[in-house]
Image (cartoon, grey):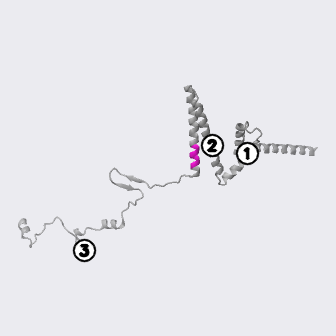
Amino acid sequence: MTTKKVTTKNNAALAKQAKQSESERYAKVSLSPATMSAVLADSFTTNIFPDLEISDVASALRDKITTIQAGDMQPIEAMLIGQAQALQTMFVSLGRQAASKTSLQQYTAFMNLALKAQSQSRATIQALTELKYPKQATFVKQANISNGHQQVNNATNTHAPAHVRENLNQPNELLEVNNGSKTMDITAATTTSATDPAMATVAT
């Protein structure tokens, strides 16, 4: 009797574990980019490929994802080229239908759709170009321009050179007498030189 209860309990635990494993598996599938993309693609291609299995589409997409993750961008380039061409075809078709309409409302509606397709085609080509030829980062040194003729570069060292600082700190030798212990009194009266009579006459 005890053995039967234990067996029943074990079977229930195994069934619960199997159910959890199946639920986890479905959760992983529902979050798989390849699987969900295959499901969406199947919704739009059923009338074209009625016998195509979703699992096969998902498998092919996983292979493409692995190729791109390895660094080979050729699948993306091919996809963008195909999209650009498909959008160009839509632009031509919608433009022709717009030209055949006599009602202004219908003409405007088809022309708007045609121009939207053309814009998306151009954007796709631009994305392909940036993928093939990525832009290089350019570093430009900033410069501040004043209103006058002065230009100040931020990267310029604003400290005065060492020899300039030394010259600014040196005493004015013209105001020093002998060894610098006595400062010349520039306010004192000057004595007229005897060798210059003209100046002596002016002084008197």
Q: Which mark is residue 58?
A: 1
What residue does disc 2 label? 83
Viewer-side label of 3, 2: 2
Stretch of the chain drawn in magenta:
123-129
Instruction: Spot the residue most to the right.
Output: 1
The residue where tag 3 is placed is 179
Amino acid beneath label 1: Ala
Q: Mark 3 or mark 2, which has the lower sequence index?
A: 2
Where disc 1 sits, the SS reads helix
Up/down of 32 relative to 177, above or below: above
Label 3: few (<14), some or many (≥20) within 10 Å?
A: few
Q: Position of residue 187 (x, y in %)?
A: 16, 64
Residue type, numbered disc 2: Gln
Q: CA distance from mark 1 to mark 3?
A: 97 Å
Considering only order in the chain, which callout, 3 or 1, is on the residue closer to the N terminus?
1
Placement of the C terminus among the 4 image quadrants: bottom left
Who is closer to the viewer here, 78 or 9? 78
